[in-house]
Image (cartoon, rainbow, N blue to C red):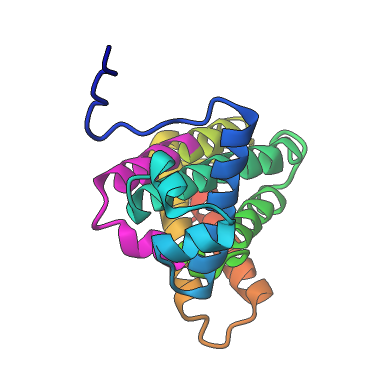
């Protein structure tokens, strides 16, 4: 009896320890190569120590690898920001002292592997799935920030949901711009100014 034909476009997901190790090796190799500025599926497979056929069992192309790496980046960003917020209870932390670690966390997430982040940004326009993950990530980040703001006595903006959107989207845009060209501005000074910007905004300063 012949085996049924595999549906086109479906690729094996890791279900065993060996499979997980293979996928992890591929993703680690891709991270290293993208961070250096360039990567091909052949180069990724070679660095991961797997055959190109094994790579294609899990990832149909390079964009699929980028998408999986971005998923991991999103999860890391949410986990990092949530942990940062949990260390600064809004009822016990001055507004500026709570905002600064959030700005630092976002900046750190983008400076650990700058080459990889440049790949993410370059792929945003070309990959609808990646754009969707960006939108989803920002919604989750905004929910974390909004919940923190809601419990802070210094926050005086009329619309917390809109304010959280402005802070998260604005911070991301500022960080991306800074990473692209810091213009000689020290990182500490950049964090100081972004913190001051959002502190004044959330206090309702005119």
**Which residue is found at the position 27% from the left and 51% from the top?**
127
112 in relation to 86, above or below: below
Which residue is outermost to the front? Answer: 1
Closest to the observer: 46 or 152? 46
Q: Is residue 206 visible?
A: no
Say which quadrant the N terminus sits in. top left
Q: Position of residue 63 (x, y in %)?
A: 34, 53
**Which residue is found at the position 46% from the left and 45% from the top?**
54
**Which residue is found at the position 67% from the left and 40% from the top?**
85
**Which residue is found at the position 59% from the left and 27% from the top?**
16
Q: Is residue 121 magenta?
A: yes
**In the shown orientation, is residue 94 left or right of residue 33?**
right
Closest to the observer: 4 or 42? 4
Magenta range is 118-140
Q: Is residue 54 magenta?
A: no
Task: Tell me the quarter of the picture where residue 20 sits.
Answer: top right
Q: Is residue 183 visible?
A: yes
Q: Main secondary structure of the magenta part?
A: helix
Q: Position of residue 18 (x, y in %)?
A: 62, 35
User: Number of numbered discs present?
Assistant: 0
101 in relation to 117, above or below: above
Closest to the observer: 15 or 155? 15
């Amino acid at each position: 009896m012949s085996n049924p034909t595999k549906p086109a476009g479906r690729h094996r997901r890791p279900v065993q320890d060996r499979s997980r190790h293979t996928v992890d090796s591929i993703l680690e190799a891709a991270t290293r190569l993208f961070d250096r500025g360039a990567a091909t599926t052949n180069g990724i497979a070679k660095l991961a120590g797997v055959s190109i056929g094994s790579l294609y069992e899990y990832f149909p192309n390079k964009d699929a690898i980028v998408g999986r790496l971005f998923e991991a980046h999103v999860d890391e960003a949410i986990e990092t920001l949530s942990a940062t917020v949990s260390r600064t209870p809004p009822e016990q932390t001055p507004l500026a002292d709570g905002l600064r670690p959030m700005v630092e966390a976002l900046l750190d997430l983008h400076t650990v592997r700058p080459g990889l982040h440049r790949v993410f940004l370059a792929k945003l326009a070309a990959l609808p799935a990646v754009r969707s993950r960006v939108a989803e990530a920002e919604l989750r980040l905004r929910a974390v920030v909004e919940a923190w703001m809601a419990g802070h006595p210094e926050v005086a903006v009329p619309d917390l949901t809109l304010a959280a959107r402005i802070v998260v989207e604005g911070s991301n845009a500022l960080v991306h711009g800074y990473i692209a060209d810091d213009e000689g501005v020290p990182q500490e000074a950049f964090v100081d100014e972004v913190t001051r910007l959002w502190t004044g905004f959330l206090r309702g300063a005119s």
